[in-house]
Image (spheres, rainbow, N blue to C red):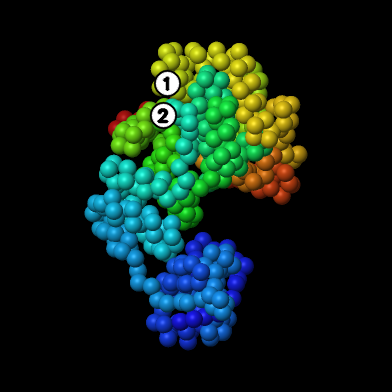
Amino acid sequence: MKLKPIPVDVVLAESTVLLSEKDSTQMGVKEGDRVVITGNKTVVAVASYGVGVVEDGSIKIPSSLLEKVGTYRDGTVNVQYSHKPDSVHFIRKKMDGERLSKEQINAIVEDILENRLSGIEISAWLTALYINGMDIDEIADFTMAMANTGSIVTFSRKPVFDFHSLGGVPGNKITPIVISIVAAGGLMIPKTSSRAISSACGTSDFVETFCDVELDANQLKTIAEDIGGVFSWGGSMNLAPVDDLVIKIEHPLGINPRAQMLASIMSKKVAMGSTHLLVDIPTGQGTKVPTLESAKSYARDLMDLGDRIGMHVECAITYADQPIGNAVGPNLEARECISILEGSKHPSSVVEKAVECAGILFEMAGIPNGAVKAKEILDSGAAYKKFMEIVVAQNGRPDLKSEDLKPGKYSFDVLASHAGYVHSIGNKQIVMVAKAAGAPSDKGAGLMIYKKKGQRVEQGDVLMTIYAESESKLQRAKESALANRPFDIEGMLLKRVTEVKPI
């Protein structure tokens, strides 16, 4: 049926068009069915009724979708019913706990890319993965299918080193330090990072406070091959685009299927041409990987997956029972990160973790005593020099200093209500407070943490300072701190026993 397209300036999670009830009935299209729309090109969209909103003979279509499909010379498009793709049956197969072939996985990924699957169907796919999982060969096929939907960066230099953290611990600001040390040691490590999804600050969220992170593939290649390191946001390039489409649906569901997580990480690394990858697995209460056993399991899967796709993968299981360092939030994390490169030895937890991870990468390259070499490079100032080369190449200031990064002008000190020892600091609670303050969208929002696990505190001591860019967000963060209580302070005396009664 030929219909007149009416552009609508809306951005939707999936391609949805509105039809009149009469036209829908005539075509045999029901609410939620797919329709094929043809103009200069052909696209698939999900149909919805626009009762009283769409005139007969017309179709309301998002402007971005209409721009993609175009129209016939007479200004119309052809619309007709589309059957469900075969991939829907493959999703049902995984829901039933069955194994999928490489071709079936490819079909699902391709249909997600081409918008042939609805949000509900993709949700079903994610739920099936969450409940039934995949074996390692299926995950390898899933990884390569996602990588092959986007651009593949090819470097003239080899090997290509990479570093990735599973995340889940606030204050994990080591990536620019690791990259600067490794690049200063002569290796090439073009790092793409993410923005925060559920955390208070992703690597790209704080790196963009001092240089550009939105680089295209050519810029990334040039900087990496000339300087050795890059701090880029992965979303600025067409790397494994299906992963980004899935994340938009995955996040509201509140689930992160293991197979999807592994394929997500590794598909981006394949797309970046990585040959050697170190994965940081932060482990502890309140993280994505709470126990040592689960961390070892992730490590085994990542290394097995690397073997199957031709990538040398090693893992570092790292301590994450509390925030890393003192700063949480974009400007504050950037300031702490840069101060270490400038020569500060504190916070020691950040320095130690960065040096150990850089050392493993050196040893993966065949350089002995990697951690010793990494520490020498950091202490000598060579890592800071390399860091500034990367910053300037990414349009940052050549006179950048750590003190240039300022926190929000509104602040509040959280005080200890009683004396004792810091028994624990809740990672999730810290994130809640920082996000309530406005992080990561407000660059000055965040926390400075002054007391860590095991330290003695007196009543009235400052445990942390909350920073915000507005009074309303500061108040919201204060309320979050009061409700969530990130610090658990206990005395040495747990209970006084004055009488023992016979049984």
Residue 469 falls in image quadrant: top right
Q: Which mark sits nearer the N-terminus, 2 or 1? A: 2
Given residues 363 and 427, the one toward you in this image is 363
Residue 225 falls in image quadrant: top right
Which element carries disc 2, helix, strand or loop?
A: strand
Which label sits on residue 490? none
Disc 2 residue crowd, few under 14, some 14–19, many 20+, Cα 10 Å: many
- At 36% across and 29% down in the image, what residue appears? 312
Q: Position of residue 85 (x, y in %)?
A: 34, 65
Residue found at the far right of this picture: 409
Is any atom of residue 185 visible in this view? Answer: yes
Residue found at the far front of this picture: 73
Q: Mark 2 to mark 1: distance in Å?
A: 8 Å
- At 76% across and 39% down in the image, what residue appears? 409
Is any atom of residue 199 visible in this view? Answer: no
Answer with left or right where residue 198 lies relative to residue 338.
left
Please say if 166 is above or below 10.
Answer: above
Please say if 467 is above or below 26.
Answer: above
Q: Position of residue 382 (x, y in %)?
A: 60, 17
Are the residues at dot 2 and dot 1 in contact (C-beta closer than 8 Å)? Answer: yes
Which element carries disc 1, helix, strand or loop?
A: loop
Please say if 226 is above or below 241.
Answer: above
Q: Which residue is mark 2?
A: 276
Disc 1 residue crowd, few under 14, some 14–19, many 20+, Cα 10 Å: some
Given residues 54 and 217, the one toward you in this image is 217
Q: Position of residue 84 (x, y in %)?
A: 35, 69
Q: Position of residue 332 (x, y in %)?
A: 66, 33
Which residue type carries mark 2? Answer: His
Q: Which residue is mark 1?
A: 365
Q: How many marks?
A: 2
Which residue type carries mark 1? Answer: Ala
